[in-house]
């Protein structure tokens, strides 16, 4: 049964997630009666087919300007239609890049030092654990100004019979504002993962997000066990080099809920000493791999170890429905929260249909509330 489930995930995610080399941009659509996110804030570099993100962009990780800086930074992953060895991937992962902005809304892409313009990518050996595809998960600004990235990746060696599926989590550091990165994970050379997949959790460990407290860091990640997605937590006391006390943080919702098939990608931010807020991607019961993806919210009062759904557990954002525009009609996911004074910014990825590819959008809640009616589009 597990092998059948894997076959289904590779086959049925094609339209929603695979990045095609020849695409039609998701552009502005007709105005809606409510304020909406009518257009992406970052789209694929379709006019530069050799660039690493010419087919799709997804999973925005956004940092406000640091001390002495005047630019916002967005790290994101994508690909040009293929993974490192020419494989057509079943996810919009591949390599990661950087864009900068004066206001966090209008972005300019920054060419990195790699030949395809990216700033971070798979290991040179395709059979390494992260040699086939990688993706930025989260980026932490250290006290010395350096940046610490937690990323995930999969290798060319088959896991459960499929290449790239056995994803694990690694760590890298940048001392030049995110333009280049050096792996600093496990092992003598720092090239190993800092959190490995466990069979009892699922087929992989992926999409890390970090809460940083004084005495420990908490990582939220997710796994898939063949039928459901679940979010897990782990703790670290050595700045993310090793992780312990792994446990379920947020399980799939009840029957009939918008997230009854599972909890996937998520963003987490601190709100007080031990309180935290999560916005997450939930999948309904429309099919394990074909259900509708919506965004929901949860809170934690124990430093991010366990979570409870907000209010009645209903979705706060749904694809193609205001405040999202029609360009998001097929899928919305990979949320990333940024606190901006009293307001919240919610960056996300989305696409309109099988003829378009992933782009990145932005919603804002001026009040800082996460309820469905609190969000508005900015483009």
Image (tube, rainbow, N blue to C red):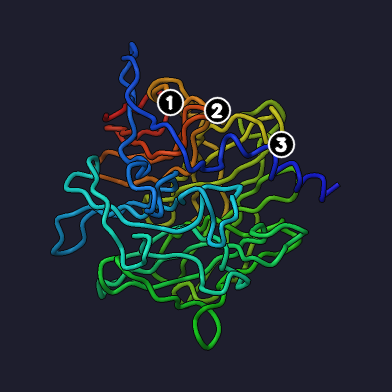
Tell whether 235 sits left or right of 239.
right
Quarter of the image where one finds residue 282:
top right
Which residue sits at x=45%, y=48%?
Answer: 267
**How far is the residue under mark 2 from the one under mark 3?**
19 Å
Q: Is residue 111 above or below residue 13?
A: below
**How far is the residue under mark 1 from the one under mark 2?**
9 Å
Mark 1 vs mark 3: in front? 3
Name the residue tied to disc 1.
Answer: 372
Q: Secondary structure at mark 2?
A: loop
Q: Secondary structure at mark 1?
A: helix
Which residue occupies the foreground of this view, 306 or 319? 319
Comes first in the chain, label 1 or label 2: 2
Which residue sits at x=37%, y=71%?
Answer: 181
Name the residue tied to disc 2.
Answer: 314
**How far is the residue under mark 1 from the one under mark 3?**
25 Å
Mark 2 vs mark 3: in front? 3
Return the x and y of residue 248 as percentages of the image width and height. 65, 54
Return the x and y of residue 130 as percentages of the image width and height. 56, 67
Neighbours of disc 3 within 10 Å: few (<14), some (14-19), many (20+): many
Neighbours of disc 1 within 10 Å: few (<14), some (14-19), many (20+): some
Which label sits on residue 288?
3
Return the x and y of residue 133 as percentages of the image width and height. 54, 60
Return the x and y of residue 47 as percentages of the image width and height. 32, 42
Which label sits on residue 167?
none
Q: Do residues under tags 1 and 2 come within 8 Å of each other at their CB atoms?
A: yes
Q: Do residues under tags 2 and 3 come within 8 Å of each other at their CB atoms?
A: no
């Amino acid at each position: 049964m597990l092998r059948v489930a894997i076959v289904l995930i590779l086959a049925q995610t094609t339209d929603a997630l695979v990045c095609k080399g020849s695409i039609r941009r998701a552009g502005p659509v007709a105005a809606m009666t409510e304020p909406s996110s009518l257009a992406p804030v970052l789209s694929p570099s379709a006019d530069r087919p050799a660039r690493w993100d010419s087919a799709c962009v997804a999973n925005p990780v956004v940092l406000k300007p640091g001390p002495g800086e005047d630019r916002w930074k967005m790290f994101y992953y994508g690909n040009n239609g293929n993974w490192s060895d020419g494989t057509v991937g079943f996810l919009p992962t591949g390599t990661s890049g950087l864009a900068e902005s004066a206001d966090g809304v209008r972005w300019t892409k920054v060419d990195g030092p790699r030949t395809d313009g990216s700033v971070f990518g798979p290991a040179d050996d395709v059979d390494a654990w992260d040699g086939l595809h990688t993706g930025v998960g989260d980026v932490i600004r250290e006290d010395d100004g350096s940046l610490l990235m937690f990323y995930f990746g999969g290798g060319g060696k088959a896991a459960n019979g499929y290449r790239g599926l056995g994803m694990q989590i690694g760590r890298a550091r940048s001392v030049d504002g995110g333009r280049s990165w050096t792996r600093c994970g496990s092992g003598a050379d720092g090239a190993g993962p800092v959190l490995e997949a466990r069979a009892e959790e699922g087929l992989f460990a992926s999409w890390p997000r970090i809460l940083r407290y004084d005495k420990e860091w908490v990582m939220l990640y997710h796994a898939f066990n063949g039928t459901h997605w679940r979010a897990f937590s782990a703790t670290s006391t050595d700045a993310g080099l090793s992780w312990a006390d792994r446990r379920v943080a947020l399980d799939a919702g009840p029957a009939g809920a918008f997230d009854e098939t599972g909890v996937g990608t998520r963003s987490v931010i601190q709100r007080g000493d031990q309180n935290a807020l999560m916005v997450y991607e939930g999948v309904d019961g429309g099919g394990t791999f074909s259900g509708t993806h919506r965004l929901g919210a949860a809170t934690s009062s124990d430093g991010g170890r366990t979570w409870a759904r907000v209010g009645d557990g209903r979705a706060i954002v749904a694809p193609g429905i205001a405040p999202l525009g029609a360009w998001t009609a097929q899928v919305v996911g990979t949320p990333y929260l940024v606190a901006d004074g009293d307001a919240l910014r919610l960056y996300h990825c989305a696409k309109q249909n099988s003829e378009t590819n992933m782009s990145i959008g932005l919603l804002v809640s001026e009040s800082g509330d996460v309820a469905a009616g609190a969000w508005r589009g900015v483009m």
